[in-house]
Image (cartoon, rainbow, N blue to C red):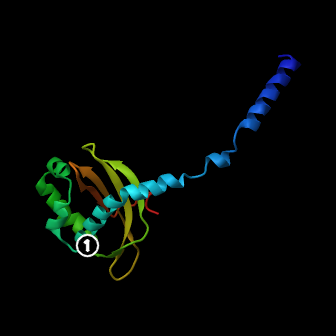
Amino acid sequence: MSNAVARRLLLMTSALFLLTPPLQAQSQPDVSADLRMMSDSAAYRQTAEAFVARAMAGDLDATQKMLSAQMVDRSGTDAIRRALEQQILPFFVQGAQVGRSVTVARTTDAGGNSGYAFYMWLSPRGGGEAHPFTVYVVEEKGRRVVANVLPGRRVPGRHV
């Protein structure tokens, strides 16, 4: 490569560098998207909070009625009832209150229904360390329902 060609290449590369916006400007978070998601997910969060309140009260029938019919059909009513009795309700009835830290993410269930996942914390009665849980709420046939609940599982990057 001749010196003239090398100089032109260097000048063109330098010009491209000068025209490229700084990376810092590109890495700024889009706060408006976060605010829009908070607004869009508000009704879904109300469903999640209602489920948690009923689960904390130990209300088996009320929590079961809030579940996705598609999930119940896939898993079977008996299996769902056992999971509520043996895993879900025992986790929530030991709670005193839900923590303030909530992370929200979009989700889609196995049936293709979209909604939001709420990564939350439960403070136990009598004090102690809070326990993580996740409630997935989707819209199924025009109704917001709980598509899944994961008690006691911390998801890194989501439970903060």
| Rendered residue at 15%/56% (across/down) | 79
Residue at 43% from the left image edge and 60% from the top image edge:
103
Task: Give residue 97's quadrant in the image.
Answer: bottom left
Q: Residue at x 22, y 68 (%)?
A: 89
Task: Indicate the amino acid at tag 1.
Answer: Met
Residue 44's x, y, as percent? Answer: 31, 58
Considering the numbered disc 1 on the image, is that residue within a helix, a strand or a loop?
A: helix
Instruction: Tell me, yes or no, if residue 155 can be seen here.
Output: no
The residue at the far top in this view is: 2
- The x, y position of residue 88, in whole percent, is 24, 65
Location of residue 27 in the rendering, given as x and y in whole percent from the top left corner: 61, 48
* Residue 105 in sight from this viewpoint: yes
Vertical position of residue 100 compared to residue 12: above or below: below
Looking at the image, how many numbered discs can be counted on the residues? 1
Residue placed most toward the observer, 67 or 88: 67
Q: Residue at x 70, y 38 (%)?
A: 20
Furthest toward the left, the residue is 78
Q: Nearer the viewer, residue 1 or 30?
A: 30
Q: Position of residue 158 (x, y in %)?
A: 44, 58
Q: Is residue 136 left or right of residue 86?
A: right
Q: In the rendered image, which residue does mark 1 sit on?
A: 56
Which quadrant holds the N terminus?
top right
Crowding around mark 1 (Cα neighbors within 10 Å: few <14, some 14 to 19, many 20+) is many
Is 141 displayed left or right of 32 in the figure? Answer: left
Check the image and report above or below for 20 versus 32: above
